[in-house]
Every structure is written in C-alpha cells, then in structure tokens.
Image (cartoon, rainbow, N blue to C red):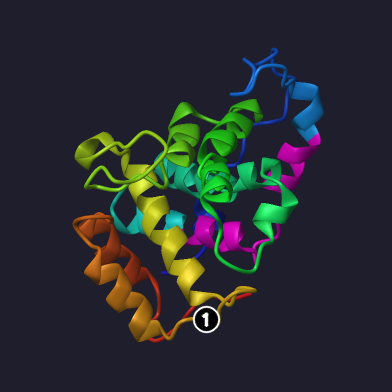
C-alpha cells in the first residue's frame, strides 16, 4: 500500500471566494491578514513534517476502512495540523532547548490557531478543522486544548495524534537526532491506550515498511 494515497483521492473542490469567516480566537484578527499564512500552510512541500503526516494519516485512514471522503479529510488535516505554529512567535518555534512554562502555554495554543486557519480555507469540511484542533488530545483526558477523553476525541484527531508523534520521533530536529525505528514503536506502544488509540497505532504500523522511517 503506498504511504501517500493521494492519487486515488477525489479532486479538491475548485477555489471560490468564501464569505467572510468568523474571527479567529483573538479579537481583531481578520481573514485578509492571514490568507497568505493559509496559502503557505497548505503549500508546504510533501517532504516537510506536515506533508509526511498527511501521507501517513491518509494511509492509516485507508487501512482502517474509512470512506474516500474521510481519507481525503485525514490527508487535508495532516497538511493543516501545524499551520497555527506560524502564529506562534518565531523565538518559541525555533528554540533549541526546552520551553519555559510561558512558552509552553503559547505553544499549546497552536492547535486552536491551526483550526482557526483551517476554517478560512474554502471547502474544508468541519471534520478537518475539528481533527486539527484536537490532534493533541489524549484518550485519558490529559491532552490539550480541551482535555477531551475516549471516544470524545474524533477518530481523525486520533489518527493525526499517532502519525504526528511517529514522524516527530522518526525525524531529526534541531534539538535531537532521529530515533531508531524500534525505539519509536516502543514509545508508541508504551502510550497506546492512554495517549494513542491502539487500533490507530496498529494500522500505522501496518502502513509503515518495517524498519523504515519517513525523513526529510
């Protein structure tokens, strides 16, 4: 099964001007000021983290037997899931060391910002921005931003959660080297059932060739 099932997905809807959307979380934000941000978010190349997460999420959705529309939604949610980090200060985004409590609170708002940006993209279904908002929730209710638990966490968000962490651990970052594949799977398995949906982790493992890691 290809890791990036975009060839079999329905074509995206034509771009048409959208009616003015509701403002984002912070009063005073306006759509026109962030159209360029949205364009950058959905235009990231597939070798970047969001592109890899999108391909993984689409593959996992397909493995789980979801409909073609839901597979496309998983892919779109993967592309958009971190777009809100563009609204987090550059200093916080690019900090090589651990974040302090204030910086961490700022970073924890990125799913909310990402969901808000996703709602500005014409034709994006509600299931996509909901998945984007909740991709850092945990099954045990200890996640953010809304501390959802169990089945209250949307399935597409559960898919994103596992794919996001898989790629983050598998890829080199400024502050760490890429983890070996066996350590990545050990970490996902250790948190399966508390943080991750076990069925999603199993599907992800079926979709990733044994011993491989998707890296830039």
Q: Nearer the viewer, residue 89 or 15?
A: 89
Left or right: 166, with 110 as reference point: left
Q: Nearer the viewer, residue 9 or 39?
A: 39
**Does 54 lie within the magenta span?**
yes
Whether 3 is drawn above or below 180: the answer is above
- Count of number-bearing discs: 1
Q: Is residue 122 visible?
A: no
Left or right: 189, with 154 as reference point: left
- Give the extent of the magenta segment: 36-56
Q: Residue at x 70, y 18 (%)?
A: 18
Q: Residue at x 47, y 37 (%)?
A: 133
Q: Residue at x 69, y 40 (%)?
A: 87
In percent of width and height, residue 146 lies at 37, 33
In percent of width and height, residue 48 lies at 65, 64
Q: Which residue is mark 1?
A: 178
Q: Is residue 11 visible?
A: yes
Q: Quadrant of the C terminus?
A: bottom right
Whether 106 is drawn above or below 54: the answer is above
Q: Residues within 10 Å of mark 1 (few under 14, many from 20)?
A: some
Left or right: 18, with 189 as reference point: right
């Amino acid at each position: 099964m290809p890791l990036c099932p975009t060839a079999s997905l329905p074509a995206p809807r034509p771009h048409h001007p959208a009616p003015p959307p509701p403002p984002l979380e912070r009063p005073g934000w306006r759509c026109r000021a962030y159209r360029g941000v949205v364009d950058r978010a959905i235009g990231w190349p597939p070798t970047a983290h969001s592109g890899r997460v999108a391909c993984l999420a689409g593959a996992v959705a397909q493995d789980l037997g979801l409909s073609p529309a839901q597979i496309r939604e998983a892919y779109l949610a993967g592309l958009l899931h971190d777009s809100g980090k563009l609204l987090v200060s550059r200093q916080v985004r690019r900090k090589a060391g651990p974040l302090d409590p204030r910086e961490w609170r700022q970073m924890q708002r990125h799913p909310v910002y990402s969901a808000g940006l996703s709602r500005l993209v014409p034709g994006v279904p509600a299931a996509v921005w909901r998945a984007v908002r909740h991709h850092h929730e945990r099954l045990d209710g200890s996640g953010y931003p809304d501390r959802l638990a169990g089945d209250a966490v949307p399935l597409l968000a559960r898919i994103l959660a596992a794919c996001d962490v898989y790629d983050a651990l598998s890829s080199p970052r400024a502050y760490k080297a890429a983890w070996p594949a066996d350590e990545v799977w050990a970490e996902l398995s250790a948190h399966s059932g508390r943080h991750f949906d076990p069925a999603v982790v199993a599907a992800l493992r079926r979709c990733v060739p044994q011993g491989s890691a998707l890296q830039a």
